[in-house]
Amino acid sequence: MTVAQVIDGVALSKQLRQQISDRVSQLKQQGITPGLAVLLVGDNAASQVYVRNKIKACEDTGFKSVLEQYPATLTEAELLQRVQALNQDLSIHGILVQLPLPEHIDGQKVIEAISPAKDVDGFHVASAGALMVGQPGFWPCTPYGCMKMLESIGYALRGKHAVVIGRSNIVGKPMALMLLQQHATVTICHSATADLGHMTRQADVLIAAVGKQNLVTADMVKPGAVVIDVGMNRNAEGKLCGDVDYEGVKHVAGWITPVPGGVGPMTITMLLMNTLEAAEHELPHA
Ligand code: GUN
């Protein structure tokens, strides 16, 4: 039985983080230390893990990082004030407000308060609009990481059919736009899609970004397809798993990303890349 080739997000991240680290050293020689501020509100357990990983990645790569942790009782006005102060802070090049925020805070309003020049998550409407019309701007880290994974295997998207399952602002929608920019024919599927398997079986590239364990099974995959699993779920035993039934799908797909060790580390790597580029914009000729 054939087995798909694995796209190793840990190995690719290691390679890219080395390149990032080299560019950070060069920037430092010119008197600029790239700085990321991470704002975490409340005590969401998953968010705490994500944020810790982001801060650690900054430390490992030579960035300055600032973690601001606030209780769930922080008001929206207080959070907006912090964002505005960080917009003015010359030592900070990227601002990340970890989502989800507590219910009493309007997350989109907070994101819109971040200066687009520091929007390293790529969630601001200005960043989303820039991606939409193909102008320079920060790309959301998770779909950006998926594009890097496709690039790493030398995959030519032109004329290929890419099917994205999921339509979130953070992954599904920007993912579709990035694939389109590379001349793929793109289909976006979601919870109201009538016959998901019918759509996915036509995919040369299949991206699963829903958050539902075993959503994609072997019978839904075209032989030889590239399958990228963005899911981050906990199974009944508490083990991290994606949206794809890896053990089944690996015998049909040509390429597959594992969970853990696939898209997850790439998301953080692209956050570092965006923050580095935000800092490089300070250079006279950047
Ligand atoms: N919550 C889940 N993923 C993300 C992310 O990429 N960025 C932020 N800010 N919050 C998240």
Image (cartoon, rainbow, N blue to C red):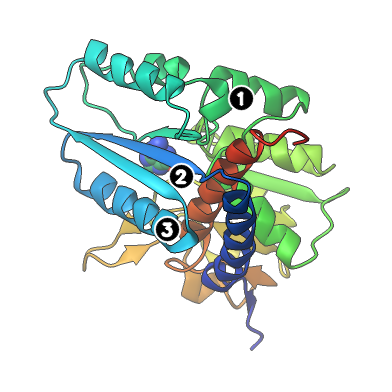
Nearer the observer, 95 or 2: 95
Q: Residue at x 61, y 53 (%)?
A: 29
> Which residue lies under the disc numbered 1?
128
Nearer the observer, 110 or 65: 65
Indicate if the residue with disc 1 has its beta carbon within 8 Å of ligand 1.
no
Image quarter hosting the N terminus: bottom right
Residue 10 numbered mark, or none: none
- Is 173 above or below relative to 210? above
Residue 210 numbered mark, or none: 2
Disc 2: CA contacts within 10 A as few (<14), some (14-19) or many (>=20) = many
Disc 1: CA contacts within 10 A as few (<14), some (14-19) or many (>=20) = many
- Is 187 above or below relative to 57? above
Q: Which corner quadrant of the figure contains ligand 1?
A: top left
Percent across and percent down for residue 140 are 56, 38
Nearer the N terminus, badge 1 or badge 3? 3
Q: Residue at x 51, y 70 (%)?
A: 10
Q: Quadrant of residue 71?
A: top left
Image quarter hosting the C terminus: top right
> Which residue lies under the disc numbered 3?
57
Percent across and percent down for residue 109 are 39, 13
Question: How much space separates mark 1 and mark 3, taking CA atoms?
Answer: 25 Å
Tell me which amino acid carries mark 2.
Val
* Secondary element type, mark 2: loop
Q: Residue at x 30, y 32 (%)?
A: 100
Percent across and percent down for residue 99 are 34, 34
Count of numbered tags? 3
Tell me which amino acid carries mark 1.
Ala
Q: In the image as oriented, which residue stretches furthest toward the top?
A: 77
Nearer the N terminus, badge 2 or badge 1? 1
Disc 3: CA contacts within 10 A as few (<14), some (14-19) or many (>=20) = some
Tell me which amino acid carries mark 3.
Ala
